[in-house]
Structure formats: structure tokens, C-alpha cells
Image: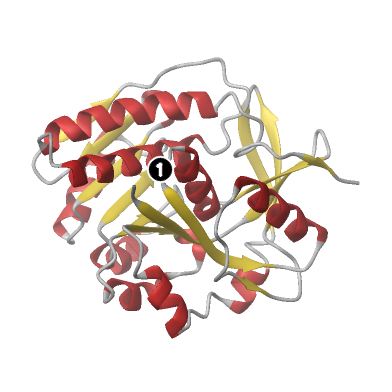
Amino acid sequence: MIKVIGLGDNVVDKYEHINTMYPGGNALNFAVYAKRLGAEAAFLGAFGTDEEAGHVQKSIKEIGLDISCSKQYEGENGCARVTLQNGDRVFLGSNRCGVLRENGLNLTEKDLAYIKEFDLLHTGLYGFSEDELPRIKALGVPIGFDFSSDFTQEQVNQIAAKVDYAYFSCSHLKTDEMLNLMVKVINLGCKLVLCTMGEKGALLYDGSTFYLQEPKLVKAIDTMGAGDSFITCFMVHYLIGLKSGKLGKQTIIKECLEKAAEFSSQQCLVDGSFGFGKVYS
């Protein structure tokens, strides 16, 4: 079994059209999906002290994730306002991760010793973890970083050299822009770069070969978490494949992309990132 950890953001996504909130956030989604895929998974982030934080923590407890090193600060938990248009999630605004943004992760030596036990650490632009990356890199733990869709070139230049795996949401980019980005990231030192493209599928580059994965199209109920689930499924199975040593790298990548497409298509049939809705007033 592999061990993975999500570092950074947790939020509640408040669906304003139905007055229901669902737990989510890039780093937490990764940990939840990884556990559902059979990995040993944990989450390290920061919770607030409001009703929203309580709902996320209650949901995590039911799922069985280890959050023993997470912090809690007085104030608002991360929260985003959301609606749906034809099954596609639309963000209306947020408090930009609440107490996590205000207080940071503040990783201790104990936290770093804990992180060192894992086979992969996942974080991203909304995890407020950039300052911690050099310390994590020094542990020898592989790092996956989600640049999402609103990254800047400056962020790519600063971060890509500090991580091992880079993920981007690229539906808004032209093909040549995406290809140039992928080549650049590999040249900065990443082992793999994965670009999700919504209904166009996904593209992966390992420095020598480009791999295109067609989507498994379904009539989506809710696309929240679709990209996160694709990335998580690919990485979990990719690490398992590498550990087994039974297949060549190209075969592993192709098989893992296929599994990720299937897993992410099923995610589009789930309300919120991973369920656990609660009506709010």
C-alpha cells in the first residue's frame, strides 16, 4: 500500500441555489479520493472554528482520514460560494481559504517528521504551501503541485523546479500554449506534467512522449472535483505501478490514464466534491 498526504486547503462549497454546503478543497479532495482508491491517506491543513469547519471535520472523521497534524485557528474556515449551470460548477466568490490564508501552515519539525513517512505529498496554489516546499523537498518526499487554471508564468517559474509532478487545468489554453507550458515545466525539472482539459480529456508529458487520454463522457450531475479526482487516480495508480516494477513506464502511464478517466467520469455523478451535503440557513 502507498501512503499519500494532501497539504493545504480545505473548504466548504456552499451551493447557493439549494442552500447546501459540501466539504472540499484541492488538498482535501486529493486525500479523500486517494483513500477511496485504497491508499493510506492523510490531510494536513488548517480549520476554522465556525459551523463550516465543524461540518468538514465531521465528514473527514466519517471518511477515516488522519488529520492529527492539522491546525485549528479562531475564525472562518475556507468557504466558497457556488452554483450549477447544466451540471457544470460555477464559482461565485470565496474567502480565499479563510484562516489558512490568514495564519499559514506553520509546519513544525514534528510535522516534517510526519510528512517524511509518505510516498507522495500533494499541494497546490490554494494551499499556501509555497514557502514550505524547500523544507519538504529536503525530506526526499516526492511533491505533486496543482497549479489549477489561474496560474501565472511567474508562479510556474518559481514553483516547478521545487516539485516533482505538476498539474494544470488547461481548458482555457490554445494547444500550442499548453504544449509549450508542458515542455517548459519538464525543462524546469519535473518528472511528469499532466494537463486536464475538461470534456477534451487530458494530456500528459514525461519529457520524451506525449500521452492523450480521451474522456469518458457522462451526463454530469456536478463537475466539482472532476479534475482533482483525475489527478488523484492517476497518481495513486502510477505510484503503485512504479512500486510493483512489473510493467514498463509507458504501459503504466497509459493504463493509469485510462483508470483516471473512468474514475473522474464517475465523480461527475456525485453531488459536491465527495458528497456529505448539509443544509445551511
- Residue 273 position, x and y percent, is 60, 39
- Mark 1 is on which residue type? Thr
Above/below status of 22 relative to 155: above
Of residue 250 and residue 160, the one placed in the foreground of this image is 250
Q: Is residue 170 visible?
A: no
Q: Which residue matches tag 1?
A: 232
Farthest residue toward the bottom?
109
Q: Give whichever of 214, 274 is nearer the camera.
A: 274
The part of the image, by quadrant, that contains residue 114 is bottom left
Quadrant for residue 240, please give it. Answer: top left
Place of residue 99 in the rendered image (x, y in percent of width and height, measured from the top left) = 67, 71
- The furthest residue to the right: 281
Q: How far across and down, in percent of the image, does residue 253 sit?
A: 21, 35
- Total label count? 1
Q: Is residue 54 visible?
A: yes
Which residue is painted at 47% across and 24% down in the image?
265
Quarter of the rendering containing residue 232: top left
Assess disc 1: are there few (<14), some (14-19) or many (≥20) residues with their C-alpha within 10 Å of its C-alpha: many
Residue shown at 46%/76% (left/top)? Answer: 111
In the image, 63: left or right of 207? right
Q: Position of residue 5 (x, y in %)?
A: 44, 58
For residue 63, above or below residue 175: below
Instruction: Specify whether 12 is left or right of 130.
Output: right
- SS for tag 1? helix
**Which residue appears farthest toward the front when viewing the image?**
1
